[in-house]
Image (cartoon, rainbow, N blue to C red):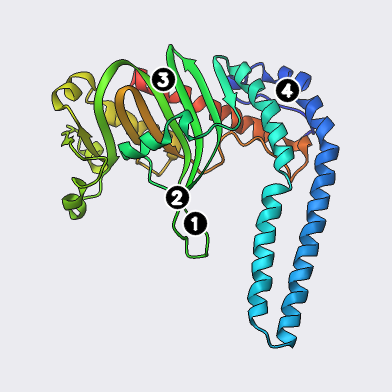
Amino acid sequence: MTEYTFTERTPDEAGFSAIFDAKIAPFLKGMEGERAEKYARSRLHFKMLIGAAVVIAALAIYLELYVGIVVAFGIAALGTNALKHFSGRGINERLAGFIGPILCDFIGDAEHIRKADKRFVDIDHAIKLGIVPSYSSGTFEDGIKGTWRGVEYRVLDAKLQKGDNGHGEPSTVFQGIVFDIATPVPMPRIVFLRERGKLTGLTETMSSARRNLQRLPIPDAEVEAVYAVYTDDIGAAQEKMTPEFGRTLLTISNEQQGEQRYLGAAFDGNRLFLALELKHDFLSLGSFDSSLGNFENNIHQAIADLMVPRRIIDRLIDG
């Protein structure tokens, strides 16, 4: 791969190589020296940290103060996480802050908000609807708002955590993007929840997401194998939502999530909320650990991420 170049691979990227050469490549070249210096300094700090932990552990063994070994490992683990989090933060923030708006200008009718909070798509309401799990701590970063085919949308990058994963760290209960998509007409509340099976049927009606709602029959066995659908107005739901909508959700999930079939979805008034789990960091425009000369793949992934809302809206409109 040639450094500081961008080769267009898909129709969505047509014309971007010239923008990359004119705007992004000079910016990356200007930042590379600073990035390399800070990265080298962080590696030195890491080695010093590990060296100190080894010394503490050795001294603890010599003095038979074995609790000191635990302390040494704790210092190493906490220090390593702190270095990863803080060392490259400034570089990554500047990269995202500069490149994100350029990408949104390129695709058109989109705006990038680097530090959006949970109110950007009302995460709390998505939790009440039951399509996003409750959490004790959350990280919210990139937000995108735009219009496609006359449809307004918002997207928020979210990582939600709760409890313990067995290693003294919180367990990730959701990592991906949450959508708020405008609907052309007001809709009754319709929630597409994960089908839990008969064993949990007795407790389903007790959950807040299902409270005061009725089960909506879906004439598609494959959809009902994945979703338990509830609504506050069966007649209006059957009138306003096409029977094929559940199949559309399965298609979107297959295209965007692969083997993961469940895609959280809920209509409520003039909004459609979707919760899409991802296996990669959404709109990842940081590159602290590697040369900025090799930034091309980050751009390819970021453009693909920005096209996800359009792909989903296409599916919702066209079926």
Question: Which residue corresponds to mark 3?
Answer: 314
Q: Residue 133, can we see it? A: yes
Q: CA distance from mark 3 to mark 1?
A: 36 Å
Circle 1 is placed at which residue position? 170
Which residue is disc 2 drawn over?
136
Q: Amino acid at mark 4?
A: Phe
Q: Name the front one of labels 1 and 4.
A: 1
Q: Is residue 172 left or right of residue 216?
A: right
Q: Which residue is mark 4?
A: 20
Q: Nearer the viewer, residue 50 or 108?
A: 50
* Rendering coords of residue 61 (x, y %): 71, 85
Q: Position of residue 6 (x, y in %)?
A: 72, 27
Q: Are marks 1 and 4 in contact (CB under 8 Å)?
A: no
How many C-alpha atoms fall within 10 Å of the one at disc 4: few (<14), some, or many (≥20)?
Answer: many
Q: Quadrant of residue 248?
A: top left
Number of numbered discs visible in the structure rendering: 4
Nearest to viewer (mark 1 / mark 2): 2
User: Relative to residue 44, is residue 132 drawn left or right?
Assistant: left
Q: Mark 4 and mark 2: span between their CA atoms?
A: 40 Å
Depth check: give the residue in front, 286 or 296: 286
Tag 1 and tag 2, C-beta contact below 8 Å? yes
Mark 1 secondary-structure assignment: loop
